[in-house]
């Protein structure tokens, strides 16, 4: 049993180390769309034409409301793509960490009933009542 716990503890340590080295990240998604322009004589009005684009939008939830920012190709889009990908990796690493911890919890031995009963001690009630309690009963 100890042989299977040690590699899991090593994997957990590695996952925690990965989390510690997580860089800039942000929640949200980036979508790429193509749209027609609406001009009657434009080529985008044809059925087989995909439309103009690509147009990019960064979308995220803020206080329960969806916010979208329109983006153009360039440095800002590249930065946002990197940050969104970093967040996706962060979430994946967190899920792996939870899975490893659950497996470790299942593999660890259960305490013996005798040991756990000896560790548990009941707190004895004081025979004397508190003054606050006595005052509230006598005044009410």
Image (cartoon, rainbow, N blue to C red):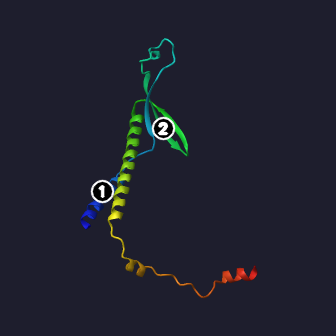
Q: Secondary structure at mark 2?
A: strand
Q: Residue at x 32, y 65 (%)?
A: 107
What label sits on residue 14 in the rendered view? 1
Q: Quadrant of the C terminus?
A: bottom right
Kindly give the residue lying farthest to the left in the view shown. 3
Query: Is residue 71 shown above or below 122?
Result: above
Q: Quadrant of the N terminus?
A: bottom left
Count residues near mark 2 (Cα–Cα under 10 Å), then give few for <14, some for 14-19, many for 20+.
some
What label sits on residue 139 in the rendered view? none
Nearest the viewer among 21 and 75 is: 21
Count residues near mark 1 (Cα–Cα under 10 Å), then give few for <14, some for 14-19, many for 20+.
few
Q: Residue at x 48, y 20 (%)?
A: 36
Gap between marks 2 and 1, in whole Å?
32 Å
What label sits on residue 59 in the rendered view? 2
Q: Residue at x 33, y 62 (%)?
A: 104
- Looking at marks 2 and 1 on the same chain, the residue that comes earlier in the sequence is marked by 1
Q: Quadrant of residue 105?
A: bottom left
Query: Is residue 52 shown above or below 114?
Result: above
Q: Position of residue 137 (x, y in %)?
A: 72, 81
Residue 99 lies left or right of residue 47; in this view the side is left
Query: Is residue 56 shown above or below 40?
Result: below
Kindly give the residue lying farthest to the bottom in the view shown. 127
Q: Quadrant of residue 46?
A: top left
Q: Position of residue 80 (x, y in %)?
A: 42, 39
Tell me how many marks there are: 2
Nearest the viewer among 74 and 68 is: 68
Q: Secondary structure at mark 1?
A: helix
Kindly give the residue lying farthest to the front in the view shown. 113
Q: Residue at x 63, y 85 (%)?
A: 129
Q: Position of residue 111 (x, y in %)?
A: 36, 74
Kindly give the residue lying farthest to the right in the view shown. 140
């Amino acid at each position: 049993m100890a042989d299977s716990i040690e590699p899991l503890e090593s994997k957990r340590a590695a996952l925690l180390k990965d989390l510690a080295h997580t860089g800039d990240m942000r929640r949200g998604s980036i979508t790429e769309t193509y749209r027609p322009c609406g001009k009657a004589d434009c080529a985008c009005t044809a059925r087989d034409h995909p439309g103009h684009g690509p147009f990019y939008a960064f979308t995220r939830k803020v206080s329960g409301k969806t916010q979208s920012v329109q983006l153009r190709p360039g440095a800002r889009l590249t930065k946002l793509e990197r940050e969104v990908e970093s967040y996706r990796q962060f979430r994946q690493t967190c899920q792996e960490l939870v899975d490893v911890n659950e497996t470790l919890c299942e593999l660890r031995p259960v305490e013996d009933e005798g040991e756990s009963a000896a560790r548990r001690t009941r707190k004895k009630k004081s025979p004397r009542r508190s003054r606050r309690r006595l005052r509230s009963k006598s005044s009410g």
